[in-house]
Image (cartoon, rainbow, N blue to C red):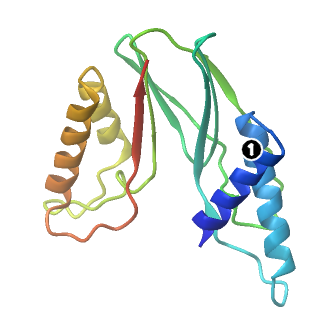
Amino acid sequence: MMTVIGNNLFNKIVNEHKLIEPAEILQQIDSLLLDTIQRHEVDDEVFTDGMDVALVRINLETKELVFAGAKRPLVVIQDRQIAEIKGDRFSIGWSLSVEKRFHQHTINFTKGTSIYLFTDGYTDQFGIKTNKKLMVRHFYQMLQEINHKETYEQHFLLDRKFKLWRGTIPQTDDVTVAGITF
């Protein structure tokens, strides 16, 4: 439900309001979502459902990327070095009582730079052998090992690793990994 509402708000903000800055877009989605929630709130309950979002704007002419995140990071691999750009520490929605201000980060990229956006479903998956989560550290190691490979091969390797890690344990969350190599 939150994804459908969020997607509709995103389309309205970008297409009708013509906003292009990731932090402004997240701020507006949060504001409109909270307005919608307040109109339907019952007995002053605190709303505790939200969306974690990573959003980028890419300018291929200037080789500039602008990122803003709501509890989601951006991973950048450039010259074999990996960097995590953290999103803000709160979700879209989630609470009516927390004042939020989203920040954005600008990165210049070069040929060969890879970026990755992902949900927490991959890193939070429990493993059949350990009954522990895969964790961000291991995921980042994998990205560093495979980022130089072709896109289809990266997809295959990430999917295979996830399935081997999970084994017969049910998938615990949605899993999305989006990667771009310039």
Q: Residue 148: image x %, image y %?
A: 27, 20
Q: Nearer the viewer, residue 112 or 97?
A: 112
Q: Residue 144: image x %, image y %?
A: 30, 26
Name which residue lies at 14% across and 62% down: 167
Q: Quadrant of the C terminus?
A: top left
Q: Residues within 10 Å of mark 1 (few under 14, many from 20)?
A: few
Q: In the displayed structure, does residue 171 sit left or right of residue 116?
A: left
Find disc 1 in the rendering and name its residue: 14
Name which residue lies at 18% across and 60% down: 130
> Picture quarter containing residue 56?
top right
Under mark 1, the amino acid is: Val
Name which residue lies at 80% across and 45% down: 101
Q: Residue 57: image x %, image y %?
A: 63, 30
Q: In the displayed structure, does residue 42 sit left or right of residue 53?
A: right
Q: Residue 7: image x %, image y %?
A: 63, 58
Residue at the farthest bottom position: 43
| Image height of 35 relative to 104, above or below | below
| Image height of 163 relative to 172, above or below | above
Q: In the displayed structure, does residue 125 sit left or right of residue 23?
A: left
Mark 1: secondary structure:
helix
Q: Nearer the viewer, residue 24 or 82?
A: 24
Q: Quadrant of the N terminus?
A: bottom right
> Picture quarter containing residue 66?
top right
Name which residue lies at 24% across and 28% down: 146
Q: Nearer the viewer, residue 103 or 97?
A: 103
Q: In the displayed structure, does residue 179 sit left or right of residue 70?
A: left
Q: How many marks?
A: 1
> Picture quarter containing residue 129?
bottom left
| Image height of 39 relative to 34, above or below | below
